[in-house]
Amino acid sequence: MKLTLEPQETAEPEIIIRGNLNDPQVSQVIAALNAVRAISRLFLYREGKAYLCLVDDVLYFEASGGKVLARTARDVLEAQYKLYELADMLRGSGFIQISKGVIVNAHRVLSVEPEFSGNYTAVLEDGKTRLTISRKYFKAFRDYVIKEL
């Protein structure tokens, strides 16, 4: 793999990868870059109090009633971000969108089961929590799990 660094006066660094994008080294570089930008802690709120939580403790985020809720094994807290903002911020932390209103921590998914409707059900590590992965998001979920995790 060839690495070229070009100094420029720009607002932010730019990374361009040229060549065979299916090369395993490219996947490793992308995973490393995602890990660098990954967020490890996040402020979540309950009853007016802010709690600094480890992102890895969150099972999933769910948009409900105009709020975004973070569900952990023990608690439900509110996030002060929109769901699409969280999806972008947490992409390198193992989170992937599985339906219009849910982003799941892929590290916490125990199994995936097909449904008759063409959707899938993600069973989380507690064995009780079941989330629907819509057909629209399943391919991206599968590709993410295979390539990123």
Image (cartoon, helix red, strand yellow):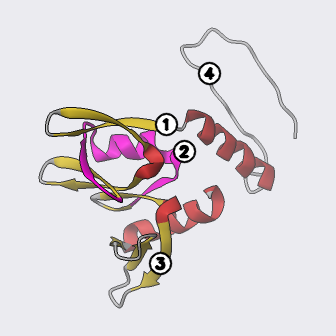
Mark 3: give few (<14), some (14-19) or many (20+) Cα within 10 Å. Answer: some
In the image, taking residue 116 as reference, residue 112 lies left or right, namely right
x and y percent of residue 12 in the render?
A: 56, 19
Residue at the outermost front position: 74
- Mark 2 near mark 1, Cβ–Cβ under 8 Å? yes
Please give the label number shown on residue 92.
2
x and y percent of residue 54 in the render?
A: 44, 42
x and y percent of residue 129 in the render?
A: 34, 72
Q: Nearer the viewer, mark 1 or mark 4?
A: 1
Q: Is residue 128 above or below residue 94?
A: below
Label 2: which secondary element: helix
Q: 10 or 44: which is nearer to us?
A: 44
Q: Nearer the viewer, mark 2 or mark 1?
A: 1
Of the numbered discs 2 and 1, the one sitting upstream in the chain is 1
Of the numbered discs 1 and 4, the one sitting upstream in the chain is 4
- Mark 2 near mark 3, Cβ–Cβ under 8 Å? no
**Residue 50 figure quarter:** top left
Please give the label number shown on residue 112.
3
Which residue is at a point 63% across and 26% down the rendered structure image? 14
Q: Quadrant of the N terminus?
A: top right
Which residue is at a point 58% across and 13% down the rendered structure image? 10
Read off the residue under disc 1: 39
The three-letter amino acid code for the residue at tag 3 is: Val
The three-letter amino acid code for the residue at tag 4 is: Pro
In the image, taking residue 57 as reference, residue 77 lies left or right, namely left
